[in-house]
Image (cartoon, grey):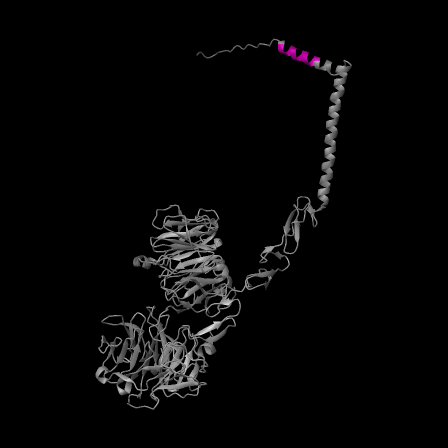
Amino acid sequence: MKFSVIEDIFHSIGLSINQPQFSSCAIWNSVATTFANNTTVGTYPYKIFVNKDNTVYVTAASIKQVLVWAKDSDIVTQNISIGVNNSYGVFVTSTGDIYVSSGDAIGQVSKWSANATVKVTIMNVSGRCAYLFIDINETLYCSSDNRNIVIKISLNSTANTAPSIAAGNGTNGPNAYMLSNPLGIWVDANLNLYVADFKNNRIQQFRPNELNATTVVGTSGTIVLNGPSDVLLDAAGYLFIVDHNNNRIVGSSFNGFRCIVGCSRVGGAGSDQLNYPYSFSFDSYGNLFVADTYNQRIQKFILATNSCGLSYNRPKISSYTTWNSSGVTIGDNNTFGALPDSVYIDIDNTLYVAAPILNRILVWPEDSINVSRDISGGLNEPYSMFISTIGDVYVDNGKYNGRVDKWTLNATSSVVAMYVNGICYGLFIDVSDHLYCSIGNSHIVVKKSLNDSVNSTTAVAGTGTFGNAPNMLYGPRGIFVDLELNLYVADCFNNRIQLFLTNDSNATTIVGNGSNETITLSYPIAIVLDADRHLFILEYGSGRVVGPGFNGYRCVIGCTGSGSASNQLYQPTSLSFDSYGNLFIADTHNNRVQKFFLITNSCSGQQSSAFLPSCPNYSIFNVTCDILRPCQNNATCSSDNTTLLGYSCMCLPGFNGTQCQYNYRPCQSSTCLNNGICNETSNTTFTCSCSPGWQNSHCETKINYCKPTTCLNRGVCQPLLLNYTCQCISGSYSGQYCEITSSRTVAFQTFSKSFAYIVIFAIISTAMFIIVMDVLKYGFNIDPVGKDLLKKKQAKKASRTRRPDVTRYIYVNALPF
């Protein structure tokens, strides 16, 4: 399931964030390494951002900082703290400008230019920006989760330009035009906006200039989300999501969605677990960095495989398979010169032969007697080669030139694929595009990612000093890496085959000296695995090929001893299967390439296809189940040659997946909350026995003990875990129900009551006086105040009729006008 496949290369380059191109069956190691813990990032690391230079940025909200790690550094190289307050979102441009959400209190998005010590305010926000994103048109997006909207503003706009709404209407809801606590956002090259609609448990896609979204991932389909908090697209259009409440990362593939890491959905602190992860980011190699917020750490999950196809043939070989004992000579020293050193047959049955004396690689299509391609130029005694799934030819050029060269399909000149310090006696490209080289003279195997422009290599086997300890090699030659990235090495001078499990420096000896197998090896020089992961080993010393048999390993080619006859080999150096199960061998010191035809491959001994199942009662040591132990959760592992991996897992009830890695039991660690006990009532149902104080189906609701309780004197009831309390008003009341009144309040109430009595008495007295006066005046014609009122009226009238006194003044020496 791909989304908005990126077609515009310029636009793809314009993004500063990594967008590796993953296959539909890319796999990450389920066990992570801790990149940083709480001593560095504090208690709540929220947003992680890895730019194309693999510089890592983390918003550490609890310590109010943005921390920066330069590429390949394990210590903080930059610390941004000025104006940072509980920051969530961060985005870094291709020019190194850092955009940071300054938190709720400040309500801004600020920019620090590269190497700047002061910030510039870019956008004012009413609240916080949980996530930031800058699209290819230099438009800045902010998901404002507490406002239920996504807003945007052009970075080329004039000052004080207000942001506009890109998604949501500000109302919490499930409609197509609404969001509920939007978090992670991503804008693709076509300007489609993807939003992790957290509380609606869905991913919404808003097309340019449209406010009605399409739900691309929701509560149904191949995956059900629970609180998605971050989202991104890879270069192939596959969608990846942080499923926050399910403690996992999920991604889309050709057939729908699948879990990537944290697939048990059980939150925990183990290296294969997450605990409410918040955000994630890929580095340029495809490795996954996760802000494992509630574990207070940053986790790094290494990309294990990124290819579904194989460039080499893997026939299914039974314990009774036989080949014609006499080989057919494909070419001799007239064709290859002396000492042809390496053969390779791709899935199209094209034959490649390394001719070191001629300093070239010769190529024949299937059933052709003519060379179709002659690779030369700059080669100096090439010993080994490997062909990629797209036809690129990788050739050892290390004896004198110290490198591995690559010829792309139909190219006339090479480029350097890897620098080495010696001859690569074995080359291999695994399913995650890592190139391996076994440097025999240095007793070491190194590898390099083909997606990495850096020329450094990593040692994956051997210490660089010869020896026979589990971590040492002595003249390693042929190598093979299986689909789970386990490395097999032909440890030539130790006469053994070593198996190095992924990321393990100590090997297990599976054939030869120190193993449980009875066969003795004589300078094993090349190895291949069939589809059931059974080994075929070419011995340089004894000139033979040994492979799996009914009761252990057996000789299958060259069993009469070394020589030059058609049924013999003399110091051979390389072998390869074609798609039919025929064996091609570089019979080096006979100066020829021999082809041994498959005769039978069935349990009955009758001639049949090379792809029939292996025979029953196969007693050879089961490498897959006994050593690799791929089945999880106590599942039973058994060989199964009908699958690509060569094994099958019988899961216990409630588990599913190829390796029984998915836990679908009703009772999970997060099913019953608050220390509730989960009881499975069937394969799909459960009940929770809640701890005291909690109730409902998941024990998620605190019991409200206030419902039957009445607090007196206007007290407010507040529920506790197993009780309640009445919050009394001020200090006037106390007691369990606020029923006790303080002495001060009693005195005040007594005074208030006495004063009320006095007022009532005064009102009654006044009313009685007025009534008595009216009775005397109108009932008995007695007016006690009448005479006094008459005298006052007469005096007032006399004062109005009195003539005023006039005073005249005469001015002496008055000034004329």
414 and 732: which one is in front? 414
Q: Is residue 343 magenta?
A: no
| Count of numbered labels shown in the rendering | 0
Q: Is residue 631 visible?
A: no
The boundaries of the magenta stretch are 790-800
Q: Is residue 125 visible?
A: yes
Image location of residue 97, percent across then percent down = 37, 57
Question: Going by the image, does 376 lie left or right of 431?
Answer: left
Question: Going by the image, does 764 lie left or right of 51?
Answer: right
Tell which residue pokes out farthest to the right in this image.
Answer: 780
Image location of residue 445, percent across then percent down = 37, 78
Q: Is residue 796 magenta?
A: yes
**Quadrant where the C terminus is found in the figure:** top left
Image location of residue 560, percent across then percent down = 34, 91
Vertical position of residue 9 compared to residue 611: above or below? above
**Quadrant where the N terminus is found in the figure:** bottom left
Q: Quadrant of residue 75?
A: bottom left
111 and 664: which one is in front? 664
User: Could you tell me what secondary structure mostly forms the magenta stretch?
Assistant: helix
Q: Quadrant of residue 432?
A: bottom left
451 and 685: which one is in front? 685
